Image (cartoon, rainbow, N blue to C red):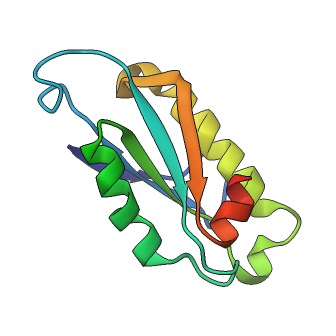
Amino acid sequence: MEYFKFQPEGTEKCSVTAYLQTEADLGGGQRKLPAVVICPGGGYEEVSRREGEPVARPYFGAGFHAFVLEYSVGDSAKDFIPLLQLAAAMAHIRKHADGWLVDEGKIAVCGFSAGGHLAA
């Protein structure tokens, strides 16, 4: 597994944690895999830790690349900022799809509570 954080281009107060399958995880093969962007809940007042990595790991175990979005909350979440951050994260993932072995046509978004609202 390759694990790292990145900040999508053009965003502030936003980061994404990536859990990527590696060639070793794939048995030495190089094939593109589906991905999921997880938007934890928290009522736009916080980003729930229990709906981030604990959700990413089962997706990773099922053969997905997983990305956990930490979007703006509180006063920083006004004016659709979290939605713009999600869009920037998707664009960033698509930009790096070849290098990360992500199937651009199979990127899902899932969310919980406020994160479900954001994902919708």
Picture coordinates of residue 21, whole percent (x, y): 26, 36
Which residue is farthest right?
79
Picture coordinates of residue 64, whole percent (x, y): 36, 38
Residue 10 visible at all: no
Residue in the image at 30% along x and 16% along y: 31
Residue in the image at 43% along x and 66% along y: 52
Determine which quarter of the picture holds residue 28.
top left
Which residue is farthest top?
30
With respect to residue 47, does 16 lie above or below? above
Picture coordinates of residue 18, whole percent (x, y): 38, 48
Name the side, left or right, on which 71 lies relative to 80: left
The tally of labels here is 0
Quadrant for the N terminus, please: top left
Name the side, left or right, on which 75 lies relative to 69: right
Residue in the image at 37% along x and 19% along y: 32
Picture coordinates of residue 69, whole percent (x, y): 54, 58
Name the side, left or right, on which 81 lies relative to 2: right
With respect to residue 113, does 9 lie above or below? above
Residue in the image at 74% along x and 63% along y: 117
Nearer the observer, 104 or 77: 104
Residue 40 visible at all: yes
